[in-house]
Amino acid sequence: MAYEHILYEVADGRARITLNRPDKRNALANPLLEELEHALWEADDDLRVHSVILRGAGQAFCAGYDLSGFGSERGTEGDGVPRRTGRTIDDDMWSLERNNRRIRALWEMHKPSIAQVHGACLAGGTDLALACDMIIAADDARIGFPPARNLGALPNNLWLYHCGPQWAKRLNLTGDTVTGAEAAEIGLVMKAVPGELLEAEVEGLADRMALIDPDLLSANKRIINVSMELMGAQVVQRLAAENDARGHRAPATREYFKAVAEKGLKAAFRERDEKFGDGRARVRGPEIRDERGFLVDPPEGASKG
């Protein structure tokens, strides 16, 4: 398969898969997800590969799903077959489940994966990252799901299994973001390091896994994943797609699409997010905000934790 929207390379016992739409901050759409799924199974089949590194080109890991319509056309094959359009709730669930199956390759493949997260890791970007076996983030990465504010629920949702129910609710119920360093503190990512050391940190972990028999890597990955499945992790992903389709019928979502039609995507996003100020949560210490909703430091003498 020739890749247009990702880069794929195998070297030194690992496959590096790079989301390669930097002008769109690596936004996800059907063509990219198709290529990603193919590359993941290709890496899993390649006996030279011990692990997979998933990363993003340019200034972001992945800013979410592409809402501009790229790759969303249906029934254009010219075969005259009527196809799903997304207008019914079942169409909606079908489309969400299809994307989930593609992303789930990260979970189901035998070889371990590392998400190398820098810049924005938002919305669908978190779907990808949390499906990986380990996430290493830059300290200043920005991680969250802002579309939860008015665009439905999360179509994939492994947050609970990483950061627990309270932080999952704190972030999912507001769409607020945390930094990579804060995400490491609450367990949403495994580790955070300064941005200039991120690649070396990820490659160093891949170096160590390159010393291990891939069959043993598989055995140890899969027993942990099966344990999470016994706790309902994969059933929740199916239910998350259905729940998102339900969320798409909320009045706020209808208002969002109306705003997009009238004002355009950027203006609709700005209108949604500006009332949330900087859109950040604070992990340690009080959330004191100015009149614009931006976090400010506590008064002198008060502890940030």
Image: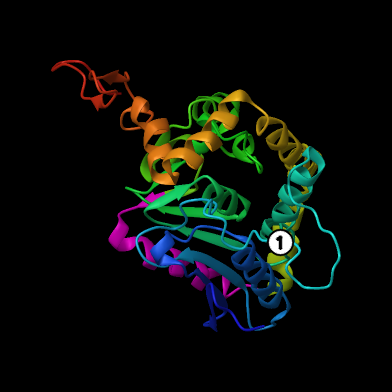
The answer to whether any part of residue 256 appears in the image is yes
Give the image location of residue 131, x and y in percent: 63, 52
The answer to whether any part of residue 184 appears in the image is no
Give the image location of residue 66, x and y in percent: 53, 54
Q: Secondary structure at mark 1?
A: helix
Q: Looking at the image, is 260 positioned above or below residue 9?
A: above
Dot 1 alpha-carbon crowd within 10 angstroms: few under 14, some 14 to 19, many 20 or more: some
Does residue 210 show up magenta in the picture?
Answer: yes
Instruction: Out of 46 and 84, give the one closest to the viewer.
Output: 84
**Residue visible at 45% across and 70% down in the picture:** 203
Secondary structure, magenta segment, majority class? helix
Question: Which residue, given by chain and number where applicable, does mark 1 sit on?
Answer: 105
Image quadrant in which you'd find residue 25: bottom left
Instruction: Out of 169 and 173, give the one closest to the viewer.
Output: 173
Quarter the C terminus occupies? top left
Image quadrant in which you'd find residue 296: top left
Where are the magenta residues, as a range? 192-212
Q: Is residue 35 left or right of residue 121?
A: right
